[in-house]
Image (cartoon, helix red, strand yellow):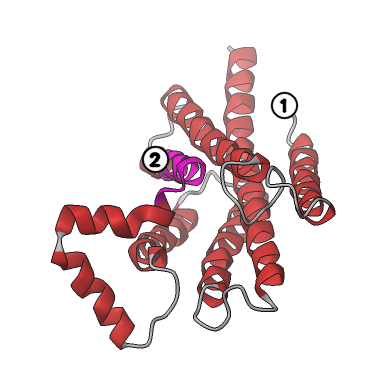
Amino acid sequence: MKKKHIKYILLTLVVIDLLLLALSFLFPTMSFFNIDMESNLPTIYQGLKLILIGSSSLLILLLLPIASIKLERFFWLFWSFMFFFLGVDELTQLHENIQTYVRELTGQGSVVYEEVFTDLGYSSTPWLLYYMFFFILSTFFIVFAARKLKDLDKSSKLFLAIGWVLFLSVLLVEYINTKEGIMFGPSYLILVSIEELLEMVGASFLFVFTVSRVTDLLNSLKSKLLDS
């Protein structure tokens, strides 16, 4: 695949993202297209996209030793694990039930943890309390890795930056939209639409970022084979 084709892949994915959002508005009574419901077309599409990012990362891990590149291995191992987890989470809606699972595993420990934030004024969805540290630590690691990985070109780093910022924006919109007094209010549908679009487009950018690295490695190996 040529590098210039990456932009066309991104454009195609963003068009599909927008189309799914449009279908939700065009057929508001159909659960299959509703972006605010689970186990339907938008959920399956997003979950498969996340899993494809994880799968592409595994391909990179296979190509890196062949290309004699060692510094990136830990990053792509982390990247693969994260997106496999997020893909499974999207398809199974693990995060929606994480409060129940953690309470069953830890007993009163999770209750105390939640009460600390509730006393500080937190009144939004519980799953953010359990996922926020994962995303904070991941952000620090991604920023650190992006600065250290010299083999990533500027366009790849741009795809990574845009995609990750959009992903983090989802958490902010989710926090606002599930606060008491806002959830299911007049602005709920608008905020849900923004949240889902940010998530889908963010994943599209991160998918293209990953595929871009696959392309670079394959082109590098092709050049070495031709030269040998």
Residue 168 in percent (x, y) is at 53, 65
Of the two numbered discs 1 and 2 in the rendering, the one whose residue sits closer to the viewer: 2
- Please name whichever residue, 57 or 49, is drawn nearer the observer in this view of the structure: 49
Mark 1 Cα within 10 Å, few/some/many (few <14, many 20+)? Answer: few
Q: Which mark is residue 193?
A: none
Magenta stretch? 79-94
Which quadrant of the figure has residue 74? top left
Name which of mark 1 and mark 2 comes first in the sequence. 1
- The amino acid type found where label 2 is placed reads Phe
Q: Which residue lies most toward the bottom here?
A: 120
Residue 15 in percent (x, y) is at 81, 47
Q: Which mark is residue 81?
A: 2
* Residue lying at 84% horizontally and 53% vertically, measured from the top left: 26
On screen, residue 174 above or below 116: above
User: What is the chief secondary structure element of the magenta stretch?
Assistant: helix
Left or right of residue 126: residue 170? right
On screen, residue 28 above or below 214: below
> Image quadrant for the N terminus?
top right
* Residue lying at 28% horizontally and 73% vertically, measured from the top left: 114
Per the image, the residue denoted by label 1 is 1
**Residue 83 sits inside the magenta stretch:** yes
